[in-house]
Image: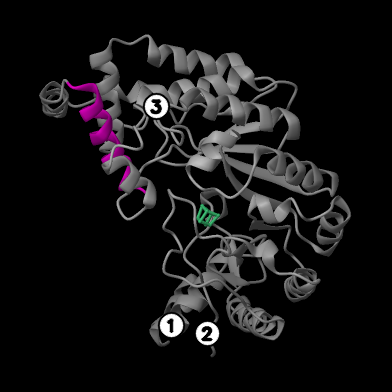
């Protein structure tokens, strides 16, 4: 059996989705904090080659479905035997499609970084073809770059919705023009607002990302206030928190090394999330924390009804003595605990080890650098 392309990047919320690669890389590729596609030249695949991939997925799907019993259960043993008899590249494709179907076969994510760059009705054609091949699909989502999205009208989004696109994920990262410029995001807050409003008017769901800490110490307040302004203007369905980490190999890391960018502490990043919650007005957006880089993963909920609950968690953390906050930061960043509550169950020996690490680094900025390095391992 022929194989199909599978790109590496997708949002965590699309972990169970079938991944269809319609473009490769990112059209912009210049954000200072990102090196995801630095060595990948952007390419939009032809309609024929995307359809070919969908056809191949459908063939793997047919093969998998022969292992579905009448009562709805699956003969996993036989699928495993079939997998063991395939060459490695086919194994991967068959595994992906079979697992997707076993889990309901409901969601598809279109890769890579900026699918909306697929112009001239090509995306519509892909969507229609995909829906025909897999009629059981309930949701198709994709990444889109806000600058490109701002040039798509509400009418055009409505057409994409009719063809089968349900949700767009967009890395807004910040709503502050100063921060967006600092990290060379290539988009303005105004363009984000235009894009967001058109997406929503077209009937699509919008999931945007916010990066606490992206403006560094100097623009920490602006970063949060700007995002709160954009979210208040757009009312996206979701705001996903992605705490900023400055990683080696990015331009932002060079800025940091040369003293042009000052890292925020974990506490300052938490305060940014607090500010986003308090300053976002008149929306029913859900704040989502679905990534290990976020310190307080329990801070999530509706910006209409759960503000108090979320602020309670944040304030509970901020009111701790500094040493306890640092202890939690390192325990969380090193994978010992997930939440503040779990600190009570921290093993005595582990606690002593972590306290030693805390006490070894009294300098606050040096500590922020250590935490940054630890977070960077996760992205
Ligand atoms: S638009 Fe997204 S994928 Fe492209 S460089 Fe920026 S952060 Fe990276």
**If the image is split into quadrants, where does the N terminus sit?**
bottom right
Between 143 and 181, the residue placed more toward the observer is 181
Determine whether, in the image, residue 56 is placed left or right of residue 15.
right
Which disc, if any, is residue 3?
2
Residue 89 circle label: 1
Tell me the chief SS of the magenta region.
helix
Q: CA distance from mark 1 to mark 3?
A: 46 Å
Q: Earlier in the sequence, mark 1 or mark 2?
A: 2
Does residue 374 belong to the magenta stretch? Answer: yes
Residue 269 spot, x, y in % from top left: 42, 27
Query: In the rendered view, would you say 26 is above or below 203?
Result: below
Q: Is mark 3 within 8 Å of ligand 1?
A: no
Which region shows up in magenta? 363-379
Q: Is residue 242 left or right of residue 22?
A: left
Q: Which residue is mark 3?
A: 217
**Residue 337 is drawn in which quadrant?**
top left
**Above/below status of 312 relative to 49:** above
Residue 2 in the image: state x and y as whole percent.
Answer: 54, 89
């Amino acid at each position: 059996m022929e194989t199909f392309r599978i790109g590496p990047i997708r949002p965590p919320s699309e972990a169970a989705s079938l991944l269809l690669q319609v473009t490769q890389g990112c059209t912009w590729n210049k954000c200072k904090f990102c090196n995801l596609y630095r060595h990948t030249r952007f390419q939009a695949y032809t309609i024929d080659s995307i359809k070919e991939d969908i056809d191949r997925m459908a063939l793997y799907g047919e093969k998998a479905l022969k292992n579905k019993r009448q009562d709805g259960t699956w003969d996993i043993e036989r699928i495993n035997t079939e997998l063991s008899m395939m060459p490695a590249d086919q194994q991967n494709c068959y595994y992906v499609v079979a697992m997707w179907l076993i889990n309901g076969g409901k969601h598809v994510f279109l890769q890579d970084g900026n699918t909306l760059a697929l112009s001239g009705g090509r995306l519509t054609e892909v969507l229609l073809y995909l829906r025909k091949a897999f009629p059981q699909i309930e949701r198709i989502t994709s990444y889109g770059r806000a600058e490109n999205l701002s040039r798509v009208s509400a009418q055009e989004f409505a057409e994409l919705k009719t063809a089968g696109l349900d949700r767009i994920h967009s890395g807004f990262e910040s709503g502050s023009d100063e921060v967006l410029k600092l990290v060379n995001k290539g988009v303005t807050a105004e363009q984000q607002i235009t894009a967001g409003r058109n997406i929503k008017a077209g009937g699509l769901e919008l999931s945007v990302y916010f990066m606490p800490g992206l403006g560094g110490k100097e623009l920490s307040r602006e970063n949060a206030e700007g995002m709160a302004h954009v979210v208040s203007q757009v009312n996206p369905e979701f705001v996903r928190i992605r705490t900023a980490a400055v990683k080696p190999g990015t331009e932002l890391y060079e800025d940091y090394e040369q003293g042009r960018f000052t890292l925020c502490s974990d506490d300052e990043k938490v305060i940014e999330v607090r500010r986003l919650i308090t300053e976002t007005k008149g929306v029913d957006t859900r704040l989502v924390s679905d990534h290990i880089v976020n310190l307080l993963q329990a801070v999530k909920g509706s910006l209409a009804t759960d503000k108090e609950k979320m602020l309670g968690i944040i304030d509970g953390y901020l009111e701790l003595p500094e040493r306890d906050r640092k202890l939690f930061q390192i325990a969380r960043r090193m994978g010992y605990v997930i939440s503040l509550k779990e600190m009570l169950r921290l093993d005595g020996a582990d606690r002593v080890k972590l306290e030693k690490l805390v006490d070894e680094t009294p300098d606050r900025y040096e500590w922020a650098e250590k935490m940054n390095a630890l977070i960077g391992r996760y992205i």
